[in-house]
Amino acid sequence: MTVDRRTVRESATFPPSVIAEIQRAADQGIYDIRGFGGKRRLPNFDDLVFLGASTSRYPLEGYRERCDTSVTLGARHAKKPIELKIPITIAGMSFGALGAHAKEAIGRAATEMGTSTTTGDGGMTEEERNSSKTLVYQVLPSRYGMNPDDLRRCDAIEVVVGQGAKPGGGGMLLGQKITERVAEMRTLPVGIDQRSACRHPDWTGPDDLAIKIRELREITDWEKPIYVKVGATRTRYDVALAAKAGADVIVVDGMQGGTAATQDVFIEHVGIPTLPAVRLAVESLKELDLHREVQLIVSGGIRTGADVAKALALGADAVAIGSAAMLALGCNKPVHEEDYRAIGAEPGYCHHCHTGRCPVGITTQDPDLERRLPPEVGARHLRNYLTVMVLELQTLARACGKSHIHNLEPEDMVALTIEAAAMAGVPLAGTDWIPGRTAF
């Protein structure tokens, strides 16, 4: 009997992807673990647009008038704050999740662009330190690979309280990626799954955090800026408590933030999007009269110079990119397609970072796969991508008449949807209405 496809009706509650996941769970009896970030549609920076200059403001001429992009991070307490040429930094991604070639490529590109990169769980590698002029060293709940010598060798310290892809939970590094080198750095067995802790072992609240920050300052002679990174959840309170505890810089990571491996249910169902998190963080710092004194870095789903410009216009001092940096290195590129299919993926849809079988040599410890990413080639691609982002950022800032990217402001933007207007705190396009603040 022939089925008339016009009569076949898909269930909105149980679409094919949900049916497949239920049946996978029934077959395997274990939750799904994957890499990358959230895949569901969320309100994001695409829902905002800039109001370019016209009669009430004049734009800047790109060929003759400067638009500066420099940013200083950590001047609140540190003797040696970080000076960056661009407001786009590289987020923490661990050695173990990424291979050594990828870490070196990121370090080289960041150095050439005058920005910073960040270590991640598992410690600092020599390739990363040697290739990164400005390196932020993460202190994570797991303490994997952490030692006081590396605290002194870095340029800033980031205390990770949470990540946007998994606030309240720890990451995973599956056994197939635990080589002898990775295991030695983490002082754990080879080939055994590792689960990072979800909270720090020696503090449980903001008072303890203040003590920890002071310890880190004393270990490093008060030279290094101290960042505190939080996953975007109760952002207003988390930012206020981090600032009160003494952070120089606060990193807020929205739920679009990527991960090497964690439960799918975490990635898709915990946290809030980056868009409202920026506004909440800025408002929190303003309430404490610390906006711009404590710098704000925003991450989670930053893809273009337009995203950067919108985050800065909402009040961020800088952004951090992770997944986008990996994509620039070649993640999900349509090459070696037979290897994508071997792990059950296709270019453009791959989230199999956790398997260690990365077809393009980024999230792997396999020497044969890793050779597909020569560090100098990866660095060139990432540098080119960062260059384009900066040019896009400057183009938009000049169009709004700004001679420095930090002069962008919420008044330069409107929202295309009611949801984005409410989340970002800017008017719905064509109106003066900000839902929740002003009458329609």
Image (cartoon, rainbow, N blue to C red):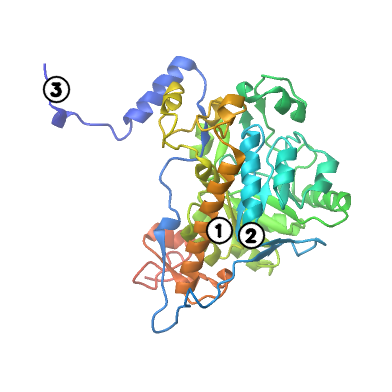
Label 3 – label 1 distance at C-alpha: 50 Å
Q: Residue at x 64, y 40 (%)?
A: 103
State the image coordinates of residue 82 (x, y, percent, origin top left): 73, 60
The residue singled out by tag 3 in the image is 3
Answer with the quarter of the image where residue 249 lies.
bottom right
Numbered badge on residue 278: 1
State the image coordinates of residue 5 (x, y, percent, origin top left): 16, 28
Residue sitting nearer the eye, 346 or 213: 346
- Position of residue 206 relative to residue 410, above or below, is above
Label 3 – label 2 distance at C-alpha: 57 Å
- Give the mark nearest the N terminus, 3 or 1: 3
What SS does tag 1 mark?
Answer: helix
Q: Is residue 147 left or right of residue 378?
A: right
Q: Is residue 66 left or right of residue 9?
A: right
Q: Is residue 386 left or right of residue 286?
A: left
Amino acid type, mark 2: Leu
Residue sitting nearer the eye, 260 or 424: 260
- Give the mark nearest the N terminus, 3 or 2: 3
- Give the mark nearest the N terminus, 2 or 1: 1
Q: Is residue 57 left or right of residue 431?
A: right
Amino acid type, mark 1: Val
Label 2 – label 1 distance at C-alpha: 9 Å
Numbered badge on residue 296: 2
Q: Residue at x 72, y 26 (%)?
A: 181
